[in-house]
Image (cartoon, rainbow, N blue to C red):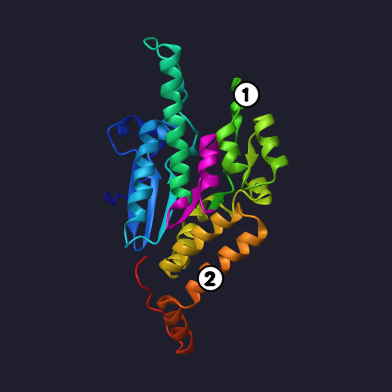
Amino acid sequence: MDNSSARPTHAEGEQLQDSPHVLTDLRGHVLWLSLNRPAQRNPLSSSMINALAQAVRDAGDDSRVRVVVICGTGPVFSAGHDLRELGQRKTESREEWVARSRLILEDCAQMMLDILHSPKAVIACVQGTATAAGCQLVSACDLAVASDQAYFCTPGVNIGTFCTTPLVGIGRNIHRKHAMEMALTGDLMPAADALRFGLVNKVVPAEDLQGEVKELAARIASKSALAIRSGKETFYRQLDMPLEEAFRHATEVMLEGVVSAEAKEGTRAFLEKRSPQWGDA
């Protein structure tokens, strides 16, 4: 793991082309993943998608990691897909163009699913604007904390297309009318509205963002990793079930949790007024 905690500035962006697309910084049990193309506004290019997906998968297999934080370097969280990469090349036919673009979009969708299915809690730390697939990335995370200077947008309609894939995640975070307002207007939505609509959990002053996310991640990291793994998977699975089936499934999983070694340890620790000693995920 590259444990660099550098936070490059916009002006340094041109010097970063050979540097990792995603910086990794393991702080205790919290892994910070920083999108590292600030000069290009951290686009979700094929290289960025592959790097972020791999980092999330690696974190899922790493017993040291209990929480993952995804953030951006520079003034923008992520501007979404790289439009230059999605454009047709002079040397390719329409069929080749469609096939190449399809692969990028499918890889992006799989990355979002990797985040959703990660056994670790994933927090978006949104310091700046998140547009299109960048906004989708925020919606894919379990929790999101935003700077009061952040904006959110699905601007496909402004360039003659539509943010259909971003709406898959966004439309599952917020009410459909708010999601459609974002997509139909292409307007920037301030962080306060993102909080009100349910896209983010909390909005804080820009200077407090890192500290707030650090404190939130530490609180989650102090809990049972096994309980979070099971609970997260169950929560997302039952959402798409009919109510009766959801209760049956959740009851069986909760029963397993109640009689688990982790629950026994947690109960003993509570009664003995001490901190629990959790096992690895």
**The one of 212 and 94 positioned closer to us in this rendering:** 94
Q: Say whether residue 129 is visible.
A: no
Q: Between disc 2 and disc 1, whose residue precedes?
A: 1
- Residue that appears at 59% across and 21% down: 159
Secondary element at tag 2: helix
The residue indicated by pointer 1 is: 158
On the image, the x and y values in percent for residue 203 come to: 59, 53
On the image, the x and y values in percent for residue 166 come to: 56, 36
Q: Is residue 23 left or right of residue 227?
A: left
Give the spatial CA distance, label 2 vs label 1: 47 Å
> Crowdedness of circle 1 by 10 Å Cα count: few (<14), some, many (20+)?
few
Q: Is residue 13 left or right of residue 193?
A: left
Q: Amino acid at mark 2?
A: Met
Q: Say whether residue 182 is visible.
A: yes
The residue indicated by pointer 2 is: 254
Q: Is residue 160 left or right of residue 54?
A: right
In the image, residue 199 sits, relative to residue 255, either above or below, namely above
| Range shown magenta | 117-143
Q: Nearer the viewer, mark 2 or mark 1?
A: 2
Q: Is residue 64 magenta?
A: no
- Residue that appears at 36% across and 63% down: 29
**Residue occupying the far bottom of the picture:** 272
On the image, the x and y values in percent for residue 34 come to: 39, 45
Q: Amino acid at mark 1?
A: Asn
On the image, the x and y values in percent for residue 88 come to: 44, 15
Secondary element at tag 1: helix
